[in-house]
Amino acid sequence: MATPAGTFRADCTCGKVVFTVTGEPLAQFYCHCSDCSRYHSTHYVEVLVYRDKPDEESHIRLLEGEQYVNCFSSGGQVRHFCRECGTAVFNKKESSGMMGTFPVLLDGFKFQPTMHLYCSQSKAYLKGITDGLPKFKDLPTELGGTGEFAVAKWQREWSNSPTRCASPVPK
């Protein structure tokens, strides 16, 4: 199936759950929260966040395999995964109207993170991460967090950044 420009095809490991992601993400980041770390069995996870548009066509659209999608609630969001292979496919946070997915699943997507989130929950040694991105204790204020930094150096740099959170929401 051909996909239009700005649309990326994604599927789970076994290929039974297939979906597309369209448009620019609201944010691209590394999540260090304990829920993501445990669920994905890693120190942090690459995440893309989109606005969920229930009255319109959503940015994340399931194409095949609805019968294989299972979910559970964790950390204030509903985590969707393939019940056959266990691949995490997307998350939905009802209270914020946001949906997230993982760039590793998207064919041809170039991940361009702008920050690290929930670093206060990180089990990784943060000083070992030298990518120059800001490391927030929880979330920036634009995403409903305190805006506090895990490492003071980024407080000054982030305050002066013209891009702040990420790309604008597509219209």
Image: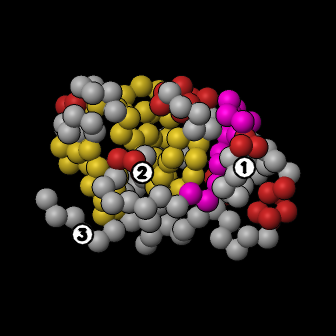
Left or right of residue 1, residue 34 in this image: right
How far from the left and from the top, in percent, is residue 77? Answer: 50, 34
Q: CA distance from mark 3 to mark 1?
A: 34 Å
In this orientation, which residue lies closer to the viewer: 50 or 9? 9
Q: Residue furthest left?
A: 1
State yes or no: residue 119 in magenta.
Answer: yes
In this orientation, which residue lies closer to the viewer: 160 or 130? 130
Tag 2: residue type?
Pro
How far from the left and from the top, in percent, is residue 52? Answer: 43, 52
Q: Which residues are magenta?
A: 113-125
Query: Mark 1 = which residue?
Result: 135
**Label 1 crowding class (10 Å Cα cut-off): few <14, some 14-19, many 20+?**
many
Q: Secondary structure at mark 3?
A: loop
Query: Mark 3 = which residue?
Result: 4
Tag 1: residue type?
Lys
Left or right of residue 61, residue 98 in this image: right
Q: Secondary structure at mark 1?
A: loop
Name the image quarter holding residue 170.
bottom left
Mark 3 vs mark 1: in front: 1
Residue sitting at x 34%, y 52%: 106
Question: Could you tell which of marks 2 and 1 lies nearer the N-terminus?
Answer: 2
Question: Could you tell which of marks 3 and 1 lies nearer the N-terminus?
Answer: 3
Quarter of the image with the N terminus is bottom left
Left or right of residue 55, residue 1 in this image: left
Query: Mark 2 = which residue?
Result: 103
